[in-house]
């Protein structure tokens, strides 16, 4: 089971302690991974008990109002047959027209590539 959650504080670039506690509780309760959103800023990808947490993926289809707000990512989670999960963030940037564009040839960025 994967969780998508609206949390965090707008413009924060890292998770707050209360969100870390919530994420750990969700994984302890059985979540296999978490996709977070709300701060309108990209935050890091972490793991807890082998389960990925994408704290905030930033904006995606959004007006380009600043470089910080236009810096985003695509979270890729891969569930292996043995139940293990690997994850990475694929760098993406919102162009002037407001649409997201992958910034690199992302093959090889993830450990399974």
Image (cartoon, helix red, strand yellow):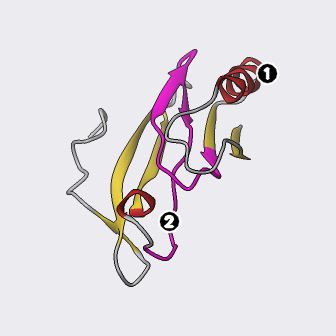
Q: Nearer the viewer, residue 92 or 106?
A: 92
Residue 110 in the image: state x and y as whole percent.
Answer: 31, 38
Residues rendered magenta in the picture: 36-64
Residues marked 1 and 2 touching at CB (< 8 Å): no
**Can you say whether 90 is above or below 85 in the image?**
below
Q: Main SS type for the magenta part? A: loop
Considering the numbered disc 2 on the image, is that residue within a helix, a strand or a loop?
A: loop
**Can you say whether 80 is above or below 56 in the image?**
above
Q: Is residue 85 visible?
A: no
Upstream in sequence: badge 1 or badge 2: 1
**Can you say whether 11 is above or below 55 in the image?**
below
Quadrant where the C terminus sits is top left
- The answer to whether 108 appears left or right of 31 in the picture is left
- The answer to whether 58 appears left or right of 36 in the picture is left
Taking the view exactly as shown, the residue that stands out farthest to the right is: 29
Q: Is residue 40 visible?
A: yes
Residue 88 in the image: state x and y as whole percent.
Answer: 39, 39
Mark 1 residue crowding within 10 angstroms, few (<14) / some (14–19) / many (20+): few
Residue pictured at 72% horizontal, 25% vertical = 18
Mark 2 residue crowding within 10 angstroms, few (<14) / some (14–19) / many (20+): many
Could you give the CA–CA distance between mark 1 and mark 2, rounded to whole angstroms?
A: 29 Å
Considering the numbered disc 1 on the image, is that residue within a helix, a strand or a loop?
A: loop
Question: Exactly how many numbered labels are in the figure?
Answer: 2
* Residue under pointer 2: 60
Residue 97 in the image: state x and y as whole percent.
Answer: 39, 84
Taking the view exactly as shown, the residue that stands out farthest to the bottom is: 97
Quadrant where the N terminus sits is top right
Circle on res. 29: 1
Residue 100 in the image: state x and y as whole percent.
Answer: 40, 70
Q: Nearer the viewer, residue 83 or 22?
A: 22
Residue pictured at 71% horizontal, 43% vertical = 7
Q: Nearer the viewer, residue 107 or 82?
A: 107
């Amino acid at each position: 089971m994967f969780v998508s959650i609206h949390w965090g504080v707008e413009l924060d670039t890292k998770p707050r302690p209360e969100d870390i506690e919530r994420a750990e509780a969700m994984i302890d309760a059985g979540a296999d991974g978490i996709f977070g959103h709300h701060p309108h800023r990209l935050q890091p990808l972490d793991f807890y008990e082998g389960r990925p947490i994408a704290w905030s993926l930033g904006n995606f289809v959004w007006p380009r109002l600043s470089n910080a707000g236009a810096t985003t990512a695509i979270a890729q989670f891969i569930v292996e047959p043995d139940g293990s999960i690997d994850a990475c963030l694929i760098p993406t940037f919102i162009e002037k027209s407001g649409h997201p564009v992958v910034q690199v040839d992302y093959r090889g960025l993830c450990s399974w590539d």
